[in-house]
Image (cartoon, rainbow, N blue to C red):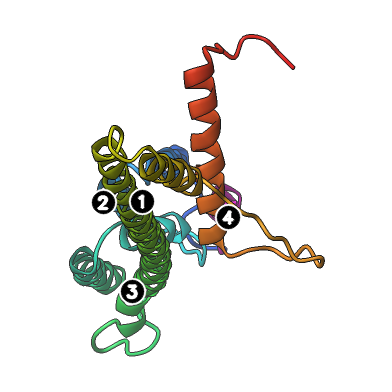
Amino acid sequence: MVGLFTGSDLAVNDPGSRQADALSWALFALSLAALVVRRRRPVPVACVTGAACAGWALYGHIGELLNLPVIVALYTVAVLGDRRRTLWAGVTAAVVSGAVALIVGRDVVNPQGLPVLEMIWPLVPLLLGEAERTRRELLAEYAARAERAEAEREREAARRVRQERVRVAREIHDILAHTVSAMTVQAGVALDALDTAPEVSRRAMTQVRASGKEAVRVTLRREPSGGAYPGVVETTAYRIVQEALTNVVKHSGADGSRSR
């Protein structure tokens, strides 16, 4: 689109002004070629297109759209740069544009003094580019904040799961430790009374067997409504069943290769 509008303006000039020739079209081709690499080399491209625009003015061409290439280049400088580069580009472009206007005598605002309009127009694409870059930076910052917040939520959730697992493991350990301690005491009683009081020994061993059965007993009660259980309860139940199945496979000698 830049080539279409600029080329059309270059081809049709006001009567009495210089008409397009080989040099004019060479500057046109140079400007378009430079714009192709404006994202990789924004500052050099701005210099090339600015020189071409100044060359047209100094050569005698009059047109309202001949500065489109340098406008695009200046916008790219601001979008892909930083505020400091935009400032230097604005100062340089304003000074060069004002100097060219003074040389060709085309100031319509104040013919006797500073060419104000010619110094202002290069600042417009720079300001637009600065605004667009700021908007992109804000969006990127918002996205980064959202990612950090999500990562923090995941870390917090993982931390809570670890804490809950430790708590459950501690409770299970305490219960089992108490049961095993009781079984140890009963076994000692049975061993001491084995020869002198067989009946006492029998009762003690019966209690050991009952305690051993109680240490692995799990009861599941599900409400008729079938509502979901808290995540901690479901995770605990899953781990208990998983460990039970692992023990079955381990102690039964099954290798899991046979399907049932």
Alpha carbons under labels 4 and 3: distance apart = 64 Å
> Residue 94 placed where, x, y %?
25, 72
Residue 179's disc number: 1
Side of 122 relative to 103 (left or right): right
Alpha-carbon neighbours of circle 3 within 10 Å: few (<14), some, or many (≥20)?
many
Look at the numbered discs 4 and 3 and tell me whether their residues touch, using CB distance below 8 Å.
no
Q: Amino acid at mark 1?
A: Thr
Label located before the other in sequence (3 or 2): 2
Instruction: Say what amino acid the circle numbered 3 marks.
Output: Leu
Relative to the observer, which residue lies in front, 121 or 139? Answer: 139
The C terminus sits in image quarter: top right
Dot 2: element: helix
- The magenta stretch is 1-14
Specify the amino acid type for callout 4: Glu
Q: Along the polypeptide, which appears first: circle 3 or circle 1?
A: 3
In this rendering, does residue 74 appear at all?
no
| Label 3 SS | helix
Under circle 1, the secondary element is: helix
Of the numbered discs in the image, which one, if any, rests on residue 123?
3
Mark 2: few/some/many CA within 10 Å (<14, 14-19, 20+)? some
The mark lying in front, picked from 4 and 3, is: 4
Q: Residue at x 55, y 30 (%)?
A: 245
- CA separation, marks 3 and 1? 83 Å
Helix, strand or loop at mark 4: helix
